[in-house]
Amino acid sequence: MHRRNILWMVIGWVILVQAQAQPTAFAPLELPAPSLQRMASGEPGPAYWQQRVDYHIAATLDASTHRIRATQTVTYTNHAPVALEALWLQLDQNLFAEGSLGDALITPDSRWRGAFSGGGFQITRIEVIHNNRRYTPRYLIDDTRMRLALEEPLAPNGGQLKLEIDFGFTVPEYGADRMGRLQVARGTIYEIAQWYPRLYVFDDVHGWNVAPYLGQGEFYLEYGDFELELTVPRNFIVVATGKLLNPEEVLTPTQRQRLEQARQSADPVFIITPDEVGRPETRPSGSGSLTWRFRAENVRDVAWAASPAFIWDAASWQEVLVMSVYPHEGLGTPEQPGWEASTRYVRHSIAHYSEHWFPYPYPVAINVAGVVGGMEYPMIVFCSVRARGEALFGVTDHEIGHSWFPMIVGSDERRYAWMDEGFNTFINYYAHQAFYGSASRRSQLMEAAYIARMMQDTLLHQPIMTYPDHIRPQALGFVAYRKPGYGLRLLREYVLGPERFDEAFRTYIRRWAFKHPQPADFFRTIENVAGEDLDWFWRGWFYTTDLLDQAIDSVQVSPEETVVQLHNRQHLVFPVVLEATYADGRTMRHRFPVALWATGVRQQVRLPGSVVRLQLDPDGLLPDIDRTNNVWPRAATSGVTTP
């Protein structure tokens, strides 16, 4: 057996040959001009600011009518350098009103459906408290948006007011796969989200971000503290964003004791066992409803779930209480584990992402089984009650991964789905590998062959930078999830290497935690920390639908050297990795920078010695649409070969 040596040559021997140039691929990428708010290095500048919105919400669930009545007090702090003459609020529940903009666009079989008779907000009172005055403002509701005029402008640089709103709505049975209710054998499961009037973001880039909610595009929200008072029937269990403040009022002594045990356990501990669901002794004695109180600090949203049908288990990771709630319908089998495995899955994800990217900053992490297929909110996620085995792990891990994007890093999901779904798909790939190893079925969706096939599908030909509401429904999974996620994998494993990429990516998360980054902030951070000009990559991968086809056109072998004619047959450019095999079995890898293609699509390179085999991209990382031209010889020949 020949000894196999692998040697990386950073540049190799190169002769650049005049050919048709590719000026577009290497032209400077035009990004917004840096400023004192957003620096050229990609970090927030000394003048960076963002608004703060704190909420106190008291809500009551009437399970007999599926209605929620609520009062909220909003404290809005204007940190902008300009006064505000009006406020804009998001009324997401209006998506479910008959005749809404979303209803007009969404087909009955769409994932984003949900409009019904009686759907939408009913707002009964709005009052502003500002400069020691209380008044009812003029306001205009336009579908899922409300403009509220202020009688006196809100002062810049710290001006503050309070806003009180009374509202109600009927919980949709199926709310655009983001919230809703599910009838199971032991009661109804309510998953409540997009459930209160929320302030739109006012930022230094667009001012008010007032895009309507149409279902497919997600959210862009301000950070603040939330206090919740959730009044539900006595036999209900409630989980929510935030720390439970009054366990002595809503839990039994046994349940409180079990929770304390769970806080010390890496293995799940039942708070309510399957046999205990529905029994009177699982609820505090007395009559009438119970009010559950929660507090969440520095989050961009709150969601909650309630049901009399919940099995409840919990464990801990460091100081995080990890929990799952699910009905009997969610239980699986030894061959196909169900929701009894959920807490173990959540714990793996929290630990993996904390150790690799940024520490999980919240006190709880909760997974809820119900009608929603998969949706994320701070500290709480909703996943399908029907999911089992690796599919349940996959959706759980994905939704928990959103704790980092966009819950910690507050991206604008309404414009840039890839900064939410793509980043998350990327980190999910490694978490999935860590749990299942290389045999993971889900990982196949993040492999080069799959990505190359999808890139050639004309139905999917929309750039990553396309706004999510403008992405064709059949293209959403590829354009917002897979392609950007795989692009980051290429940056990490092919372009920069793990050490440089990981440092840059961690820096991006740390810089923009609990802030509002834009695409340029991400691009500039990666370039500045990694020390690499990546304009060619951002343009080709994110702004176009270009394809990649690196090829070996011809090879000329002599005892002293091997001359290789390379051809970039499509418009997408990448560095070249060329593995040469010699007669004695040695291999040598030559790496040529992406600038190889700057002067033309055909280039000649010279390698030392007499080579018997050549292969482009030997690790199979590039989404090359034709790999048959990546290997020489394609047939047994000698001398000059033109495959």
Image: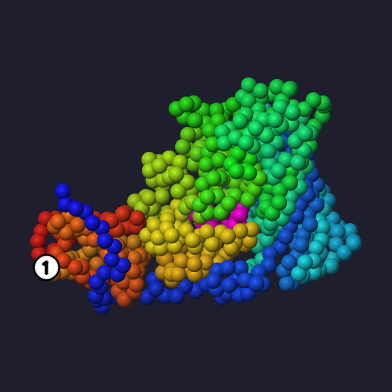
Which residue shows up at 16% across the image and 59% down it? Answer: 582
For mark 1, what is the residue? 558
The verdict on residue 90 being magenta is no
Residue farthest to the left, as pictured:
638
Taking the image as shown, residue 51 lies to the left or right of residue 442, namely right
Which residue shows up at 46% across the image and 37% down it? Answer: 390
Residue 590 point in image, percent of width and height: 27, 64
* Residue 94 in sight from this viewpoint: no
Residue 625 point in image, percent of width and height: 31, 57
- How many labels were placed on the picture? 1
Which residue shows up at 45% across the image and 58% down it? Answer: 488
- Type of the residue with mark 1: Ser
The verdict on residue 407 being magenta is yes
Which residue shows up at 34% across the image and 51% down it? Answer: 449
Taking the image as shown, residue 548 lies to the left or right of residue 420, namely left
Q: Quadrant of residue 438?
A: top left
Q: Is residue 260 above or below residue 469?
A: above
Q: Nearest the camera: 135 or 300?
A: 300
* Residue 171 in sight from this viewpoint: yes
Residue farthest to the bottom, as pictured:
18
The segment highlighted magenta reads 405-422
Residue 553 point in image, percent of width and height: 21, 65
Q: Is residue 425 above or below residue 325?
A: below
Q: Nearest the camera: 363 or 224?
A: 363
Q: How is the image coloured?
A: rainbow
Circle 1 residues within 10 Å: few <14, some 14–19, many ≥20: few
Taking the image as shown, residue 153 lies to the left or right of residue 463, namely right
Residue 87 point in image, percent of width and height: 75, 62
Q: Quadrant of residue 178?
A: top right
Q: Is residue 33 above or below residue 464?
A: below
